Image (cartoon, rainbow, N blue to C red):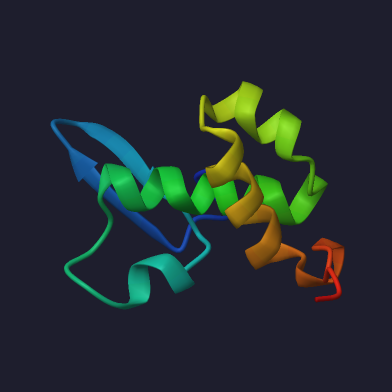
Amino acid sequence: MCGRDSSSLARRTEGRLISLPCSGEAWRYGSGPTLDRLRQDRTLNETFATGDPLKLMRLFGITEQTAMRYVGTAHPERTAKLPR
């Protein structure tokens, strides 16, 4: 996650400083950050970093199909193109 110094968005809520993720792309469109968008952003970020579907399944509790969709999105060169 982003720290207070590296975050592009920070706001005070009830006396606490809350830092929002600094990836920017996920938050540029729509009504702002939501928990679902945050989860998707963190999962995609981990997929770009590792590309390991088994690690994604264990870390985020997602199904095999969902993990493979993330890997296919982040690393299209790693998906098999089977001849027909």
- Residue 76 in percent (x, y) is at 76, 70
Task: Determine if residue 1 is in view.
Answer: no
Whether residue 8 is situated above or below residue 64 in the rendered picture: below
Q: Closer to the camera, 15 or 68?
A: 68
Q: Residue shown at 45%/50% (left/top)?
A: 40
Q: Quadrant of residue 56?
A: top right
- Residue 63 in percent (x, y) is at 53, 33
- Residue 75 in percent (x, y) is at 77, 65
Task: Determine if residue 72 is in view.
Answer: yes
Quadrant (top left/top right/bottom left/bottom right) for the C terminus: bottom right
Q: Is 36 placed left or right of 6 in the picture?
A: left
Quadrant (top left/top right/bottom left/bottom right) for the N terminus: top right
Q: Residue shown at 64%/66% (left/top)?
A: 73
Q: Closer to the camera, 58 or 21?
A: 58
Whether residue 28 is situated above or below residue 61 in the rendered picture: below
Whether residue 69 is situated above or below residue 30 in the rendered picture: above
- Total labels drawn: 0
Q: Residue shown at 35%/53% (left/top)?
A: 37
Q: Residue shown at 67%/45% (left/top)?
A: 46
- Residue 10 in percent (x, y) is at 34, 53
